[in-house]
Image: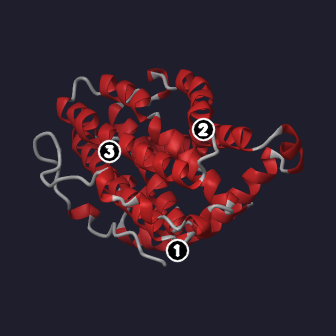
Amino acid sequence: MTSPKKFTMDCSNLPAIAAPAHSGVRDTPHWTLDWIDFSRIRIETVHDNDDLFYLLVSASFVESGSDTYTRNLVAHFDTHPQIADWLQHQWEPEELQHGRALRTYVQTVWPDFDWEAAYAAFFAEYAPLCTVEELEDDRALELVARCVVETGTATYYQTLRDLTAEPVLTELAERIRLDEVQHYKHFYRYFRQLNAERGLSRARIFGALKRRLNELRTSDADIALRHAWAFRHSPAEADEMPFEQVCQRLYHRVGALLPMEQAVKMLLRPLALPHRMEHIIERPLACIARRVMTA
């Protein structure tokens, strides 16, 4: 499942972006937690919103565990130092910062929630699943899989942003969304670099897209959500609000708001389809995807 007034995701310039130069580390300063004034949070407007609680806590767990799978990715791309350097020195720090920012927001709004204990339980289940064996053997195809993940996160944070008018959350979700769009652009650029040498067929690229899409609803986000739910409720309360019911409600709400057209554009890009074909299939695919998400 791995987001608030409607903005559109600007991905229209992706095909024209040149391959990254040098390490890919940004030239301009990246935002820090000091830029977010958590004291301005309008707690009363979000405190009783259970959906926001679950979406924010589960996202904070996944982002906070980023260093675990980053190590695997860095090792996987050890023969591509440009990519490994970017992963280690830009992507991982930014992902971990997302986790710290979301955790700070959660602990400010819901101070009684034991974030540390819930995260420890999540991580105990999540960490063993982060293995090199889970990655695509072909490095170019792993970059395709990363494009799927970044598509999911970028659209998730856009939806999260659009779910509330609370100004600090709107600002935070937008900052993270922009980071995730930039991450997508880097993975896509690196894929094009490697695929210029590999020349992978569309069938193989589509296979990687499909495999990663199939994992989205049964992977880290579901584990994170389950532990957020478990530490949110007492056993008696859990009987009144079963986990499956919470999941269904959240998937339906998020799925109804996700910018599917943008997501489909981003997912189709690695296939390098003829423009006319892309244009014909984008809207039907977006409709199908929304039906699946809200089922």
Whether residues under marks 1 and 2 lie with C-beta atoms below 8 angstroms apart, the answer is no
Q: Position of residue 113 (x, y in %)?
A: 64, 43
Left/right of residue 47 with respect to residue 213 in the rendered view: right
**Secondary structure category for the residue under label 1:** loop
> Foreground: 69 or 101?
101
Which amino acid, by three-letter code, is at mark 3? Glu
The label number, if any, that marks residue 165 in the structure image? 1
Task: Residue under label 3, please give it.
Answer: 94
Location of residue 76 by image quarter = top left
- Residue at (76% x, 52% y) in the render: 246
- Residue at (67% x, 63% y) in the render: 49
Q: Nearer the viewer, mark 3 or mark 2?
A: 3
Q: Crowdedness of circle 3 by 10 Å Cα count: few (<14), some, many (20+)?
A: many
Left/right of residue 120 with respect to residue 184 in the rendered view: right
Whether residues under marks 1 and 3 lie with C-beta atoms below 8 angstroms apart, the answer is no
Task: Residue under label 2, please give it.
Answer: 219
Which amino acid, by three-letter code, is at mark 1? Ala
- Residue at (69% x, 58% y) in the render: 50
Q: Crowdedness of circle 1 by 10 Å Cα count: few (<14), some, many (20+)?
A: some
